[in-house]
Amino acid sequence: QTGWLKAHYPAEFQAANLTKNLSNMDEIKKIMDDCKKNGIKVLNPDINESDSRFTVNQSGEIRFGLGGIKGFGDNIVKAILADREENGPYADIYDFVERMSGTVNRKAFESLLHSGAFDSFGICRKQFMTPCKGGDTFIDALLRYGELYRKDTLDSAISLFGEAEELKPERPELPPMVGDEDILQKLHMEKELVGMYLSSHPLDQ
């Protein structure tokens, strides 16, 4: 039965295997090697596509589950999935912090960032650590904006002037990319959080 499943549904079979062995890194590495040998891609976690466990997307590639990110609480995974189910995919990084501020703390945000979950927004991971016009790094400005947005939303519910646009917090401007991404540092952080290199490999260059 397992041979038949592996032959006819290879990506689904391996996704189930990876989910089953989530806490066994040695077994995970063996399955990953088998995926590579058979041309099955295992992709980074993605804030709009990942479930809590490993799943197969429409392209037949395995998507890393949010529940597999180290140190990432199950309660936060459930909150993200519930919000996405109710309100749809996140349009951009600002939409994410506006909707999840107060639920996703800094540690969880950094885990998502460095595991590659925000890559589909088209922002390089290095840009989050780059200073904005005000001098703060983009990640600091973004998280502070999220807190202000949440406070403003709560205040609007009881304020007579809650809809006044000029009082609303302003989205921080994304700083331009300076230089190149530090690939080795990026991969080191990735391996720390998901136990393996996913976006590329240190020896690729």
Image (spheres, helix red, strand yellow):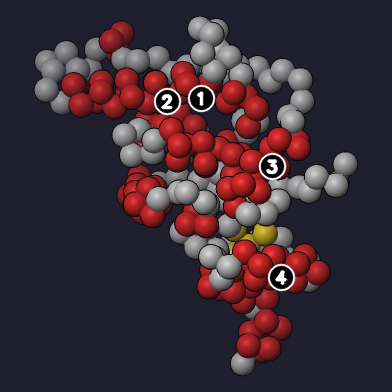
Q: Is residue 48 visible?
A: no
- Furthest-bottom residue in this view: 1
Marks 2 & 1, CB-CB < 8 Å contact: yes
For residue 139, the mark is 1
Looking at the image, residue 54 sits to the left or right of residue 153; the answer is right
Would you call the spot at circle 4 few (<14 residues within 10 Å), some (14-19), or many (20 or more)?
few
Residue tagged by mark 3? 188
Would you call the spot at circle 2 few (<14 residues within 10 Å), some (14-19), or many (20 or more)?
many
Quadrant containing the C terminus in the rendered view: top right
Would you call the spot at circle 1 few (<14 residues within 10 Å), some (14-19), or many (20 or more)?
many
Q: Which tag is nearer the camera, tag 1 or tag 3?
A: 3
Mark 4 and mark 2: Cα distance apart in space: 38 Å
Q: Which tag is nearer the camera, tag 3 or tag 2?
A: 3
Q: Quadrant of residue 105?
A: top left
> Relative to 6, does residue 187 appear above or below in the rendering?
above
User: Which amino acid type is marked by label 4?
Assistant: Lys
User: Which amino acid type is marked by label 1?
Assistant: Ile
Q: Residue at x 61, y 92 (%)?
A: 1
User: Which amino acid type is marked by label 2?
Assistant: Leu
Mark 1 and mark 3: Cα distance apart in space: 19 Å
Residue tagged by mark 2? 143
* Image position, residue 15 (x, y; %): 59, 69
Q: Earlier in the sequence, mark 3 or mark 4?
A: 4
Q: Residue at x 49, y 32 (%)?
A: 93
